[in-house]
Image: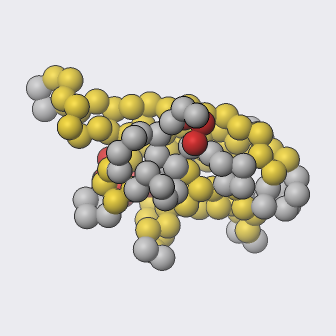
Amino acid sequence: MTLEASVIKDDAVRSTPSGYEVDVRIAWYRSLPIACLENLSVSINEQQFTADQISIRVNDALIPVNKAGELLDEWWFTQDPITAILPASTPLTSGETATVNVSLATRIPYIIIGPDTALVQRTDVSKEVTIQ
């Protein structure tokens, strides 16, 4: 299994009264600080959710993705997903199938590719899932 194949599991998407929760796994072989999450966008059946609309759950708090860079002391462990909270007025219901696309940009702080510049790994994954 590739690292990209593990980003979205079969049961990763849940419908909620206010939208969706999507479990996103890191596309890297080592745990990284959540601050390394540079960008996250998700689409569900072509309904696009951009970083300015998405929050992530960190220790029971909701943090806007755009503020993830401030989470230097919180870790994204390889075995644990980050739960993305997506607002939607009419989410699909449990049992429906959907095409989910996730785009991640993750900074790898120990791979330096230029002066004061770390590698940013970009990962795009698409998967057909059943809404939970």
Kindly give the residue lying farthest to the top in the view shown: 114
The residue positioned 58% from the left and 34% from the top of the image is 1
The residue positioned 18% from the left and 29% from the top of the image is 112
Q: Is residue 87 visible?
A: no
Please give the count of numbered marks on the rendered protein.
0
Kindly give the residue lying farthest to the front in the view shown: 1
Which color scheme is applied?
secondary structure
Q: Is residue 36 left or right of residue 23?
A: left
Relative image position of residue 110 (x, y in whole percent): 20, 37
Q: 33 or 35: nearer the eye?
A: 33
Kindly give the residue lying farthest to the left in the view shown: 115
Q: 114 or 52: nearer the eye?
A: 114
Q: 95 or 92: nearer the eye?
A: 95
Relative image position of residue 7 (x, y in whole percent): 56, 43
Q: Is residue 106 visible?
A: yes
Name the image quarter holding the C terminus: bottom right
Above or below, 123 relative to 34: above
Above or below, 115 relative to 67: above
Relative image position of residue 62 (x, y in whole percent): 48, 69
Q: Is residue 43 left or right of residue 129?
A: left
The residue positioned 39% from the left and 56% from the top of the image is 76
Relative image position of residue 16 (x, y in whole percent): 73, 68
The residue positioned 32% from the left and 39% from the top of the image is 107
